[in-house]
């Protein structure tokens, strides 16, 4: 059996692990345009900020691929799919045959149509190559504009600020982290940015990059007519599934490659996982791309197991985010931006203590947790995430969910300073992420995982045929 995996990141690595658990003899080929082992993509902004050393970036070392018997093909991309011949086309016209194929080519940054975008000094920020380009450019930059105030934009902006640059974030919408924060929380976040001297312009967009005769960036012009001086620009307006190389194939592609609950595409033997796919969203009840690391990990694991003859099913996922900047912490999952009274069928529970910077919001639909948003004290993130997974009816204790004091006696977050917690009681309690549950509640909570291993077990336990 020959397995070919296009891509060499988290989805690919978990697929390799799952394949080898079932098949020690099959050939595995990994195609990697980037000439390096898999690395922790979420850490590249931390590396730019000088907060993590270079040795923390690799997700797997060369030895891992040797131990798994993987043939790594560096410097080549999948450029086409010929399923009728059971092969893929690679850079340079080479062909590689497969028995099972995994498309794990991730996402690519969206570059909006801005005048003067092409040329030096303007970079997206999603790969190690982008990190290296920006690090090399830093010596010529004093002022930088970050286009887009999403997760990547905000983290890149913080990193550049910490490197001593004057940073202005420009966001088309009226708030920062627009797909995570709601009105109140985004005002808090903005205040935090201001406190640290970071500039932002909301409700405006960059229409042109101004360059001098040599092509060097001089600044950006905004739709409103404002001009912001800059020597560098980071474009972070979102990523799209990397389906370009597959566009002339018979694969079913909407926004991403459409997969079933085994992570198989409409072509038998061809699987897809990670940021490239459009898989089931447990909360929306529809397929769509959700581009986060833990889902790419799970999807790769399920695809790999099924490629090697397993029968694992993906129950679905939902967006989960945890981000911090300048010490300001945000954790969210599922529907987090919904405002009270926005939707009749949705109930929003909130606890807000502005003085202490505490904000907890839980979104319920039909008494089931469909999302949450918490700021600063994020100790309940595990409980809330677990409640989303479990789809448990919370009618009996919902009034306690966001309350300050009365965490239901069934679930106690481990928060130092609230009340002394004796670890002797661990014998009677089970830990789920940040929370402890008494074993007496085990039955109720067994389908309520928050650690990734537990979520993976949930996929197989419930659906193994
Ligand atoms: C700066 C940044 C910060 C992030 N922070 C977080 C975070 O805090 N939390 C979180 O959950 N998620 C975060 N993410 C998202 C997370 O990194 C992705 O969801 C995850 O990496 C997706 O994994 P993947 O395996 O699908 O693909 P990717 O990690 O995107 O990797 C794609 C792989 O495919 C290869 N490839 C590309 N084109 C081809 C081709 N034509 N042929 C063959 N191979 C190809 C690439 O070289 C790469 O090896 C962040 C992303 C970025 C960029």
Image (spheres, rainbow, N blue to C red):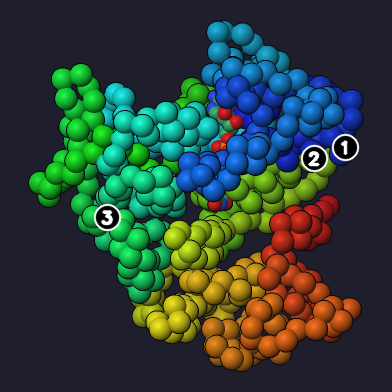
Provide the secondary structure element on which disc 2 rests: helix
Mark 1: few, some, or many residues within 10 Å (few <14, many ≥20)?
some
Q: Position of residue 36 (x, y in %)?
A: 63, 26
Q: Mark 3 highlights which residue? A: 199
Residue at position x 23%, y 30% in the image: 217
The answer to whether marks 1 and 2 mark residues whose Cβ atoms lie closer than 8 Å is yes
Is 430 displayed left or right of 188 in the figure?
Answer: right
Place of residue 447 in the rendered image (x, y in percent of width and height, measured from the top left): 75, 69
3D distance between C-alphas at marks 1 and 3: 53 Å
What residue does disc 2 label? 18
CA distance separating discs 1 and 2 = 7 Å
Reply above or below: 322 against 371: above
Residue that carries the numbered disc 1 in the rendered image? 22
Front label number (2 vs 3): 3
Would you call the spot at circle 2 few (<14 residues within 10 Å), some (14-19), or many (20 or more)? many
Residue under the image location 60 percent in, 41 percent down: 53
Q: Is residue 275 visible?
A: no
């Amino acid at each position: 059996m020959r397995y070919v995996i296009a891509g060499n990141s988290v989805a690919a690595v978990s697929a390799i692990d799952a394949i080898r658990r079932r098949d020690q003899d099959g050939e595995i080929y990994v195609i990697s345009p980037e000439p390096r082992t898999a690395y922790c993509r979420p850490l590249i902004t931390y590396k730019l900020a000088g907060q993590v050393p270079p040795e923390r970036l690799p997700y797997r070392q060369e030895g891992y691929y040797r131990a798994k018997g993987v043939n790594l093909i560096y410097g080549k991309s999948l450029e086409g799919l010929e399923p009728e011949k059971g092969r893929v086309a690679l850079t340079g016209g080479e062909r590689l045959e497969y028995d099972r194929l995994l498309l794990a080519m991730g996402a690519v940054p969206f570059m909006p149509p801005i005048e003067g975008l092409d040329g030096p000094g303007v970079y997206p920020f999603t790969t190690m190559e982008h990190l290296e380009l920006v690090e090399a450019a830093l010596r010529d930059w004093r002022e930088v504009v970050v286009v887009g105030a999403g997760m990547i934009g905000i983290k890149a902006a913080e990193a550049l600020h910490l490197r001593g640059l004057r940073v202005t974030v420009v966001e088309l919408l009226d708030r920062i982290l627009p797909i995570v924060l709601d009105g109140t929380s985004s005002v808090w976040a903005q205040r935090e940015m201001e406190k640290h001297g970071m500039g932002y312009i909301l409700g405006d967009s960059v229409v042109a990059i101004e360059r001098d005769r040599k092509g060097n960036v001089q600044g950006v012009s905004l739709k409103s007519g404002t001009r912001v001086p800059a020597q560098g620009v980071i474009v972070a307006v979102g990523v799209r599934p990397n389906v370009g190389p597959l566009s002339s194939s018979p694969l079913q592609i909407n926004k991403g490659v459409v997969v079933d609950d085994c992570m198989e595409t409409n072509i038998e033997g061809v699987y897809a996982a990670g940021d490239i796919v459009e898989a089931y969203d447990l909360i929306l009840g529809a397929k769509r791309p959700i581009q986060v690391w833990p889902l790419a990990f799970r999807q790769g694991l399920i695809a790999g197991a099924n490629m090697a003859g397993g029968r694992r099913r993906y129950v679905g996922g939902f967006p989960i985010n945890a981000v911090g900047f300048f010490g300001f912490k945000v954790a969210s999952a599922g529907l987090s931006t919904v405002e009270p009274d926005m939707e009749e069928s949705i109930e929003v529970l909130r606890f807000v203590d502005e003085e202490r910077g505490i904000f907890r919001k839980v979104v319920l639909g039909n008494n089931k947790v469909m999302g949450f948003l918490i700021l600063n004290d994020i100790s309940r993130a595990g409980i809330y995430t677990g409640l989303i997974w479990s789809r448990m009816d919370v009618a009996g204790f919902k009034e306690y969910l966001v309350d300050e004091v009365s965490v239901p006696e069934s679930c106690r977050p481990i928060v130092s300073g609230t009340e002394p917690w004796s670890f002797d009681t661990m014998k009677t309690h089970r830990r789920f992420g940040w929370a402890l549950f008494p074993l007496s509640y085990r039955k109720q909570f067994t389908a309520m995982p928050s650690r990734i291993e537990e979520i993976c077990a949930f996929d197989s336990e419930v659906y193994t045929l």
